[in-house]
Amino acid sequence: MARLHAGRGGRLIKPERLLPLRERYILQHLLLGLAALTGGATALIWLTQSLHFIGMIVQHGLSLPAFLHLTLLMLPSFITVILPVTCFLVILWVYQRLDSDRELTILQATGLSPLRLACPGLLCAGFATLTAYGLSLWGAPLAYHHFHRYELEIRNRAAAFLLEEGVFTPISKAMTVYVRERRSDDSFGGIMIEDNRVPTNPVTILAEDGLAEPHGNTLRLILHNGSRQTLNRRTGELSTLLFQLETLDFGSPHDQTLSPDVAELTMSQLFHPQGDLSPHARNKLLIEGWTRLTGPLACLSYGMIGLLCVLRGRFSRHGNIIRPTVAILSVVGLMILSLMLKNLAERDPSLVPLLWTEVLLPITLGGGLLLWDATRRYRLSAAPVPSPASR
């Protein structure tokens, strides 16, 4: 039994009166198309991007769940980027199909204004905008944070698999490891390490044997019975230290930075950065924050362009390729303009209002045109019809 909603005076309103069957029919096709197209595009991008990690999986023997866990964390970022484009394409395709099948012509003949016909498209674009805001402000930064940390953890743990017998293996740009023997229990015999992380004091470590084990986000190498030779380049003095037990971390802050990426920072960290940063770095963080606020509105902006190109044009019996082409070129132009404004705003933060203007202008103009069409149709329908006697 359909649910009833209370209206004014305690009267009950059926949901069919809030959203009639024709609007629900169009909205259903829009949402299904949006889910299908966004899912397909996301899967395609995920497949192409995940190819970069297959080499790590094959060479280092990482498990399939680790591969899936790592690559699936990239999905929120992909969806945030492609959702405005897929929303525009779905709205344009569904309304263009309704127009070619003359369904829009029939609905307009019943007295429906372009604004009323645009309601399902606006609801679909509004849903996409809310979803994009949830991903842009919370989902994508959180997922990328876990992706960044998990990738670093995998690379640090995989460092042990890079060590081969009789090979000088560069662990990083400043560290090289030589292993004479690799045993079945993942321990090593005959180890030599050249450590140049401090260029003024290079270190050479020799050890009889060692064992690698994970330690947090780093890989720790435990060395036994060896020596540590440190050269002071300023004085030329060589100092030697004998040890029975020594630990060395791979992937430490000296090797791989643990500083967060811009994409994983929260909104408060973007608008109120901590630390002594250069003006360019602060502008970059600031523009990233404004982009997260303006980017999701592109769903509504691009969707409005698709609705205007279909609903405000005339029906052509032989089809019309001009209106879809104009809509696609308009969206491509807005995307290029958005990238240009973002790069310019990083140099001059006073251009931030242009980021808002670029996404709000199509929404404002489109909404104004649809309202003008609706009021004009209302005035024409309300105008008195002259009687035959007055003619």
Image (cartoon, rainbow, N blue to C red):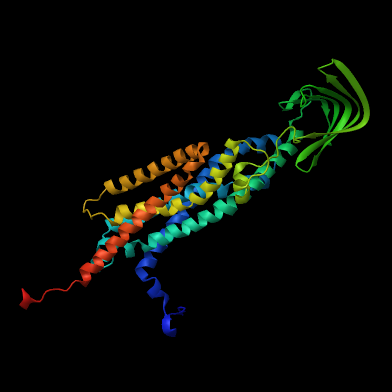
Instruction: Residue 317: name its quadrant.
Output: bottom left
Q: Residue at x 78, y 37 (%)?
A: 219
Residue 188 in the image: above or below residue 334: above
Q: Residue furthest top?
A: 236
In the drawing, does residue 280 fall left or right of residue 294?
Answer: right
In the drawing, does residue 356 fall left or right of residue 69?
Answer: left
Residue 20 in the image: above or below residue 195: below
Closest to the observer: 121 or 184?
121
Q: Residue at x 41, y 52 (%)?
A: 360
In the drawing, does residue 171 fall left or right of residue 268?
Answer: right
Closest to the observer: 232 or 225?
232
Instruction: Residue 255: name its quadrant.
Output: top right
Q: Residue at x 71, y 34 (%)?
A: 256
Q: Is residue 389 visible?
A: yes
- List x then y, in percent, for residue 371: 31, 62
Q: Is residue 92 visible?
A: no
How many numbered circles does the render carry? 0
- List x then y, in percent, for residue 300: 42, 55
- List x then y, in percent, for residue 136: 55, 51
